[in-house]
Image (spheres, rainbow, N blue to C red):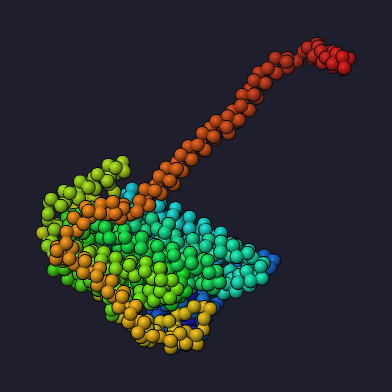
Amino acid sequence: MEVIYQYAWLIPVLPLLGAMLVGLGLISLNQVTNRLRQLNAAVIISLMGAAMGLSIALLWSQIQGHEPYLRTLEWAAAGNFHLTMGYTIDHLTAVMLVIVTTVAFLVMVYTDGYMAHDPGYVRFYAYLSLFGSSMLGLVVSPNLVQIYIFWELVGMCSYLLVGFWYDRKAAADACQKAFVTNRVGDFGLLLGILGLFWATGSFEFNLMGDRLAELVATGSVSNFLAVLFAILVFLGPVAKSAQFPLHVWLPDAMEGPTPISALIHAATMVAAGVFLIARMYPVFEHVPAAMNVIAFTGAFTAFLGATIAITQNDIKKGLAYSTISQLGYMVMAMGVGAYSAGLFHLMTHAYFKAMLFLGSGSVIHGMEAVVGHDPVLAQDMRLMGGLRKYMPVTGFTFLIGCLAISGIPPFAGFWSKDEILGAAFAANPLLWFIGWLTAGITAFYMFRMYFSTFEGKFRGKDEKIKTQLKQAAAAVVAKLAGEPAPNFGPGAMKKGELEAHSHDSHSHHSDSPHESPWTMVLPLVVLAVPSILIGLVGTPYANYFEQFIFSPTENLAEVMEKAAEFDPQEFYVMAGSSIAISVVGITLAALMYLWKKIDAAAIAKSIKPLYEFSLNKWYFDDIYYNVFVLGLRRLARQVLEVDFRVVDGAVNLTGFFTLVSGEGLKYLENGRVQFYALIVFGAVLGLVIVFGVT
């Protein structure tokens, strides 16, 4: 078994090798590489599959009781400073490796059907493989510096994938927004890393935590500095995991192809922030003020995301705000000390949210058969309805995802979300109330999405609704004074490309939607299994997950002692309340969008200010645009003015003085000795007069 650990470095290297081979082929033999598109895809999928197999073997070994494994080498040294690089395999790493590789593998299989007609099919696979390698490298990193290196690589891959259709303004703007927003958080993370190294002299997680606690206790480092360093480090997860106030980039990132939404923005990259909090837990746990900031930031973000998702009509945007909300739950769990609960929800959410995003891609794929490659129509739930009878597998798996995220037992989301709510109640009832209320809102907007999409009458042929949606989209474009450049959806086809690639049935318009090809349906079915069953490893009766993943500052004996204190009556009360609020949310959604007993439009009209507040995303985008974009432009103009008038003015004045003095001196430098003697005489006479008078 030890041999597996010695070759664990292959897990991030194998996808990197695939990206490198395909990338070199695209650079050197572009046409040949693009013609062999499915061969390239098979190579990349196979390499990720090998990494997945090795990851599963490592997880099994850790479950069997193998000691954590650390392998490092000295990367840089200067005096007493030594920086090591390498990899570590422990319980947390093993679980994260399996999550990342399984989701990435299934997304890659799905991509073959989704991107079938895209001219950038091979390039997309290269980007996917590079991202997978970067994320896996982050997971196995044994110290904070190496995590930061892969952290930035993951951000770069996100930029490439969100802006995959770089020739469209919307995608270009979205990837730039994601890049800039993440740079704000990453700069804070870098300052925090440097501050912690200055204080503790180490980049090792446990050493940093122990030394910082000791320095604060002895007064060598003030409590203020400890809180500052911890919050600066937390800024990295705030940006990467789309927490308030740096959450604004994630919904715009839906401009990327849907497989990216499933892989990066639901299951892996955004979870990197929660993973970093887990790795840095030895530091955060000793700084109570920072833990409070983390907890309340997560709770507010969970509520914020849910209240915005409630009014979204674009199916992908609704899922994006749902992701923000669920990440808020994870961060809140970390803040209240529920280490295992936060990571448990990370795992369950990765599977059911990846399935939901892939399901949305399948829906859009089916809708485009009817409405064409117009994402304003293909992604708007107001033009869907009744898709379950046309797309039974997609509809069934989407329903499973909705039940899981709504916290209905025995689906996975119930067990992980309920554990978080229980821990929040024990820490602060206010946090519990926010999480409990958010759970009800979550159930409402998810079943609003399901009923609007899969139940009722199909509205895809309703010309009146199409006209209204197009007019509304045109009004938005006119307001922004920009060009319409939305996501082109399934197949990643550009305008006009549909006719150019009309070699199969998916390239023709029809009167009704259709189920997606097997390469897209199979991953949905596979992901449905963990979405139903994986929560059973973390039941409060026998919490195997918590016995395997627990805080690095605890030991197994303490965990088992806490488990023995389990109170069934308390669990029934807490679980019953969370199920009740979820059932209320589902019932309201059914009354409004399935049975039409309540007029949702009338309610929206009666509370129009609140409806507009939610629909406009709490106006955060508008505020940021006016304050930062326009504000920085005004500042830039002022700097330009100073540069033009002061800096350039000083340089121009120097040049003018040189020109004038040169012009004057040329009349004095005439080469006549008599004239020079006259000047000397005049100067001597002037000196005599001056000193004679004095």
Task: Give residue 474's position: percent from left, percent from top.
Answer: 23, 45
Relative to residue 643, is residue 136 drawn left or right? left
Q: Position of residue 91 (x, y in %)?
A: 46, 80
The residue positioned 46% from the left and 64% from the top of the image is: 237
Report whether 44 appears left or right of 489.
Answer: right
Q: Is residue 619 visible?
A: yes
Vertical position of residue 687 compared to residue 18: above or below = above
Could you tell me if residue 74 is visible in this image?
Answer: no
Q: Between residue 594 and residue 132, name the one nearer to us.
A: 594
The count of marks equals 0
Residue at 42 percent across and 65 percent down: it is 298
Which residue is rendered at x = 17% and y = 49% of the image? 468
Residue ID at (24%, 48%): 473
Q: Position of residue 195 (x, y in %)?
A: 59, 62
Q: In what quadrant of the picture does the C terminus appear?
A: top right
583 over 234 or under it: above or below = below
Snapshot quadrant of residue 454: bottom left
**Horizontal and vertical percent position of residue 311:** 26, 57
Quadrant of the rendered image containing residue 650: top right
Q: Nearer the viewer, residue 347 or 43?
A: 347
